[in-house]
Image: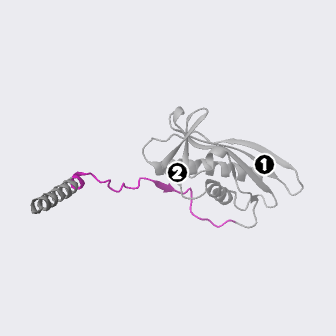
Amino acid sequence: MKKLALCLQLSALCALSSVLGLLSACNLPQPQADTVRHFTLSTPAATPADGAVVRPVQLAGHLRGRPMAVRVAPNEVIYNEDVRWAEPLDDAITQLLRARVGSAGAGRTITVQLSRCELVRAEGNNVQLAATWTITAADGTAQRGAFTAGPRTWDGKDQGALVGLIRDAVNELGDTLAAAVAVK
């Protein structure tokens, strides 16, 4: 009986030491560093109250998420999960356009539909911004236009520089709208 009890105790100790040995040999997953970077297009700016009304920008469906859209083929978009917008893109672009239009075009309403605001890898890291816009006067007459930003190429290195190129393209659109509302 004593031998049996001693054997059971020894077996239990061996089993316990084996389990402890296995646990100490395991590579438990280490916490991963967060590689996600969040970007904004601008800082909050005061908007003149006496200028044209810039309605909230309407985005194409593929641009509505927080991850940055990257076009890899004419009909294929992927999302860079490590580069995200810290604010809704439509809000940020609307804010930039309001600041750019400023006090020009009082009594007019501007609507903008953005179809492109993305990096296009298939075209050599080209940054593209394309939109259609309508400026409606108080009497209901409307002026319409299409916009495509000038060529901009990202070097593929600094994500912050990519966001800067997108901001420059949005500012170019804002300058185009400001010039259009200034025409009587």
Residue 92 in percent (x, y) is at: 62, 57
Left or right: where does residue 39 sit relative to residue 133? left
**Pointers 1 and 2 in contact (C-beta within 8 Å):** no
**Is residue 38 part of the magenta span, yes or no?**
yes
In this orientation, which residue lies closer to the viewer: 60 or 151? 60
In the rendered structure, which amino acid carries the disc numbered 2? Gly
Q: Magenta: predominant secondary structure element?
A: loop
Give the labeled residue for mark 2.
164
Q: From mark 1 to mark 2, how far is it between C-alphas? A: 26 Å
Give the labeled residue for mark 1.
134
Relative to 98, residue 71 above or below: above
Q: Residues within 10 Å of mark 2 (few under 14, many from 20)?
A: some
Q: Secondary structure at mark 2?
A: helix
In this orientation, which residue lies closer to the viewer: 96 or 33? 33
Which stretch is magenta? 22-47
In the rendered structure, which amino acid carries the disc numbered 1? Thr
Residue 114 in percent (x, y) is at: 68, 46
In this orientation, which residue lies closer to the viewer: 163 or 183? 163
Q: Secondary structure at mark 1?
A: strand
In this orientation, which residue lies closer to the viewer: 153 or 119? 119
Q: Residue at x 75, y 49 (%)?
A: 180
- Colour pattern: one colour
Left or right: where does residue 57 sit relative to residue 84? right
Residue 182 in percent (x, y) is at: 76, 54
Q: Residue at x 61, y 65 (%)?
A: 45
Q: Residues within 10 Å of mark 1 (few under 14, many from 20)?
A: some
**Is residue 171 part of the magenta span, yes or no?**
no
Left or right: where does residue 5 sit relative to residue 31? left
The image's mark for residue 69 is: none
Relative to 5, residue 74 above or below: above
